[in-house]
Image (cartoon, rainbow, N blue to C red):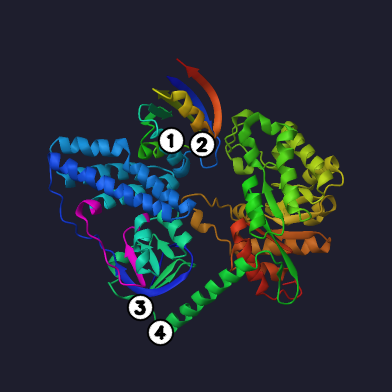
Amino acid sequence: MRRIKCLPASPGFAIGKAFLLSKKDFPSLTERGEEALFLLENAKSKLREKLQLDSEKLGDEEGEIFLSHILLLEDPEIWGKVQEKIEDGKSLEEALKEVGDEVVSLFESLDDERFRSRADDIKDIMRRIREAIVGNEIVVPEGSIIISEEILPSHIVEFERWKPKGFISSGGSPFSHSAILARAKGIPMLTSCRGITEIVKDGEILILDGEKGEVIIGPSERLQKIYLEKEALRRKEEKEAIAKRHLPAITKDGKRIMVYANVGNPEEIEEAKEMGADGIGIFRTEFLLFQGEDALRKESHLKVYRMAGEIFYPNPVHIRLFDIGADKPFKFLNLPDEPNPALGLRGIRLLLKKRELLYPQLEAIMEAHKEYQNISVILPMVSFPQEVKKIREMVGEIPVGIMVETPACALSLSKMAKFCDFFSIGTNDLLQYTLAVDRAGKDVSELYNPAHPSLWRLIKIAVKEAKRYGKEIGVCGEIAAERAFIPRLVKMGVVHLSVSPRFVPIVKEIVRSLNRGDGEN
Amino acid sequence: MLKVKFRLTREDGLHARPAAQLVALALKYPKLEITLEKDGKEVNGKSLSAILTLQGEMGDVISFKISGEGEEEFWENLKQTIQGEVMEIEKN
């Protein structure tokens, strides 16, 4: 038995026989000149039809992936170069390979992962053109786990009829189009599984763990059984979660936990409602800043706040004040450059300095609150009680919440409590400031560990203090959506969990399976 | 010829989806020549692969040059698809 760590790209567990989709040997395309051009045009029009069908068969979002393949098929840069090479006397084989490699390496040199992973789409279109020229297809035994250096979007769609149990690639990325498709189809997938194509033999039994991000090669029968049960349970839970998404999340011992949604624009508010959220835990308002100067007018805010208040009435909507700093691209605000924006003028500090940014937003919240009393304000990046006191004095009776995102804040809730009404622990930033680790930092991101005891000690202190002062406290970081951490948070006594809209149903379902106890653990 | 400086305000900038929408629209105007420029790099507006290599993010400024039959109509349609803020527009 052997385990290999990889990146989870589509959740779920699978047990099946490995199918090594080794680079299939196509006959070399030796045609040149007119004949090569004719074959190419012919293949393109065949493929065009096929892609149209693929894209119509799929839903909107997934269909768009193949729509982009259709556009690549018309790409004047790619096919212009292929044609040039053929006209220069190269064979069809050489022309396709050279141009494909050239464009792929251009993509692979890009610095943003989300653009870089589009190289897969280029490889895919080149592969399918060759296939369309040659005209043969791969046969896969049903129920296999398909393994390759890379899994391309068309693999996922074409192999669907062989009912694959999972996909594993030695390269690739969880951001790729194929990962999106695998998730949409509910097929587990792993990427970045180094060396897998060398280590695994065709037909060998594997377990694919799409949650931990792990492949187990040659598992014992007992382990296989455990995983079969895990998968059955997961599927059942997922189904129930969706069916019961509009019902409250009540623990086995009868305590209601509010499951809110974190949203960043008006569309997500509607999505949150549809996914059964009990309210809006954090309404990130930075999207308004992209209107430029208009963000400094009360009216631009008011419309969206009213909409949120109405959709969720009478459930809470926590509107977070602008959480920005010098690292954000808003030129009209003329923010000074800072050597260390994460520790600089940001969040509430910036708002208290730049009142022209603060006032329109606060006024809009106060006005919306008159109509919809479920609306409240929540303050980002608080470190000092004075910051909260100042806002309290401005807003009067409107409920004020605090994002607990700095260790200083977590350790001084008792000083904050008299100025505010509730707390929400923003664990992403809290962890970054506690460990002094930037989770997006290339060389340090692996140190970013949400299980680190220091984070949990801070959470525990904060929850205890909040309760002592009779204030509501919840959690809104990514850990609030993680199966491994939810039981711990609920047992500690947090009263709300705020997560991305799509995670609301499953978080509710996980809460329903727990015993809270006395909420002091 | 239409020259437009345009700031991207969609959260997904000129990522896969908006880039595809742009090209899908451009391909409907066979007589139109379209180029996009960002930071001195100029690409063909009908080539999805080339547009993606610009790595257009929310907040970036893209300069469009559009010339040929239907340029105004194309621009009107494009504005609706890849939302943004017109910073400068020049017709000649």
**Furthest residue in direction right, as rendered:** A397
Q: Is residue A518 magenta?
A: no
**Pick the front one: A106 or A63:** A63
The residues tagged by marks 2 and 4 sit, at their Cα atoms, a distance apart of 54 Å
Q: Amino acid at mark 3?
A: Gly
> What's the residue at 84%, 61% (across, down)?
A470
Q: Secondary structure at mark 3?
A: loop
Q: Which residue is mark 2?
A: B81
- Foreground tag (1 vs 3): 1
Same chain? Circles 2 and 4: no
Q: Amino acid at mark 4?
A: Glu
The subunit letter for the residue under badge 1 reads B
Q: Amino acid at mark 1?
A: Leu
Label 2 close to label 1 by CB (< 8 Å): yes
The C terminus of chain A - image quarter: bottom right
Residue B56 is situated, as x and y percent measured from the top left of the image, at: 46, 37
Instruction: Specify the segment rendered in magenta.
Output: A131-153
> What's the residue at 77%, 53% (across, down)?
A313
The residues tagged by marks 2 and 3 sit, at their Cα atoms, a distance apart of 51 Å
